[in-house]
Image (tube, coloured by chain):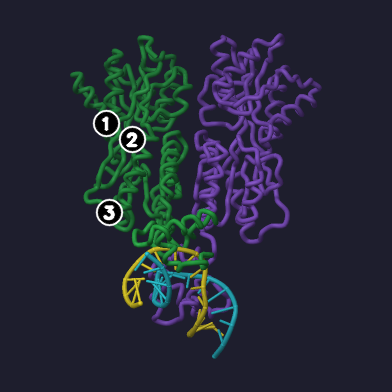
Chain colours: A purple, B green, C cyan, D yellow
Amino acid sequence: MAYRLKLAKSTVSRALAGSPQVGPATTARVRALAAELDYRPNVMAVSLRRGHSQTLGVVVPHLRNSFFPQLVQAIEEAANAAGYGLLICQSADDTARELQRLDLLRRAQVAGMLMSVASTTADSAPFEALSRQVPLVFVDRFLASSVVNAAVVDDLTGSYQATCHLLAQGYRRIAHLTGPQHLNIYRNRRLGYEQALHEAGLPVVPDLILPSALHVPDGKQAVRQLLSLPKPPDAIFSASDFAALGCLQALAACGIRVPEQMGVVGFSDEYFGQHTTPALSSVDQRAEVLGRRAVQLLLQLLKKPAAAPRHLIFPPVLRQRASSTRHGIV
Amino acid sequence: MAYRLKLAKSTVSRALAGSPQVGPATTARVRALAAELDYRPNVMAVSLRRGHSQTLGVVVPHLRNSFFPQLVQAIEEAANAAGYGLLICQSADDTARELQRLDLLRRAQVAGMLMSVASTTADSAPFEALSRQVPLVFVDRFLASSVVNAAVVDDLTGSYQATCHLLAQGYRRIAHLTGPQHLNIYRNRRLGYEQALHEAGLPVVPDLILPSALHVPDGKQAVRQLLSLPKPPDAIFSASDFAALGCLQALAACGIRVPEQMGVVGFSDEYFGQHTTPALSSVDQRAEVLGRRAVQLLLQLLKKPAAAPRHLIFPPVLRQRASSTRHGIV
DNA sequence: CTGAAAGCGCTAACAT
DNA sequence: ATGTTAGCGCTTTCAG
């Protein structure tokens, strides 16, 4: 505060904050000097005073595939653009660690939190307690059982489109690899798949819907299981690109040609999907949009604590590639 | 501070800090009550008082491939284990944004910083200025021109091993795709390559060393260029898995069989390398080790500001896969 | 060994 | 429209 030259620090503070109470001339003078001195308010002092920091926090399961890094990148940019730092934590898809990370964020007194729950998490109580203390927005993954602020992909529609695409390509017996049903994302992906079948007048065959951990080996295992069926499927729609990759590998190993004998579509549009043989069709969740809008929602919540929880839903985009395209369309 | 029950807050503070000045009996009593009340010191107040936060900051170019996410994951775990939060920033491999992110971290008064420089950054002056203000440790990437604290992979050795491996497989004309030479990593990778050739009594052919941006299309372009040479190479060692992937694709498109007609080895052991056809041999940088040890170094620096800058160097591991293995070894 | 008091840098009542 | 003052919650001299 080298402004002793002229004014009381409170006036300076007000001027910098753009308070209408302070004279326009003084405001200008203060601002000029601040710029000249490259003055930066001490973040800690401000935070201590305000009771929270100029930081947002986000907890994601991991940063392994391309979806979460993209999401985090978008969140970071939006946060920084709004003058907030971003504290990023990984839960390693583990509930205990997730809670620990949330506690870390709480102690860091982040102004708001974003979170994508671990796939093993089933209890919504901690989140409800937390959301009474600090604004909380879920991104992509949340517990289907809870009513919360969230920015999510319209998984159902994405899934529906993917399945319709397979049907349009002439596939008739479509299997589906799905994940834990207490997570909104996997449940909706399954529902979209079923809806498309219904509308096409096709039956939903329980044997063709395989619950799975959706990693690469699970995809391989699923192929073995599906091929051993009396009436095997002619296409596989996987709720994850990783499992879809496992499918491609297992099918190649079995000598089953994709897309001629078996169509395959994944979900998430991971980076590697463009480079498999054949290239993997997938549903692009557009993580950038999701991240940016989730931050917007959170920032709104910071201003006024919101009446009812809101859901922001964004349509995904089907990326059609060789693994599901019989007629030479790319 | 509900401890009014007994003591002055200064005593409580000391007891919690484990000061030897306070009586053991009192210390115990205070600790017991603190545990019972689940008391957490206010991070902001502590930070304001101490002049820095209980947070570390890290700037990485991006989180797109698997190396940086792995690195960040390791750093996060080590930081959290030591009671620090982690502020993660991405520079988008852009110098201007990098400086902006560093400023953000400085303003957040992180206790220490870790950083992996953007590939376009060439000026070390900002880092030198910064490192006088806050402990700074470079991870993996730093400017070859500067003397700094750093935890790095022994790129030279990794590269040397990869090239020796290709030589052992019988390849004799090995091309090398390299990146910006002002970055330690690309320079060392090139040097390791050259050293292996020297030791094998083979010439270093300038035409076979291609500077590149090392993205997938650059790899494709490189293959075209190499194949148009009067004497094309029989193997390619790329300083990046992405460029190596481009090579594999271009070679497949040209009908050149890998590894029979052309060996390919990449660098970084990206996730997708296990799933290309053929699977891509690569140098695993063991990001977890790197991240963990970098944090260790930084934490040491926080305790005592260190005499001379130190370099921690870790050996990488060659992951031998089909793309460079002529004799059926996996 | 413990207590009292000052102050980190800022903001928001409460004056003027 | 500007100044004064009282803390936010903690650590750390300086006194007992």
Q: Residue at x 37, y 39 (%)?
A: B292
Q: Nearer the viewer, mark 2 or mark 1?
A: 1
Residue type pointed to by label 1: Leu
Q: Nearer the viewer, mark 1 or mark 3?
A: 3
Q: Secondary structure at mark 1?
A: helix
Residue type pointed to by label 2: Gly
Write down the residue under mark 3: B305
Q: Do callouts 2 and 3 mark residues in contact (Cβ within 8 Å)?
A: no
| Image quarter hosting the N terminus of chain A | bottom left
Q: Residues within 10 Å of mark 3 (few under 14, many from 20)?
A: few
Of the two numbered discs 2 and 3 on the same chain, state the one appearing first in sequence. 2
> Which chain contains the residue that carries disc 3?
B
Q: Which mark is residue B179?
A: 2
Where, by quadrant of the figure, is residue B53 drawn?
bottom left
Of the two numbered discs 1 and 3 on the same chain, state the one appearing first in sequence. 1
Question: Is B32 in front, or is B136?
Answer: B32
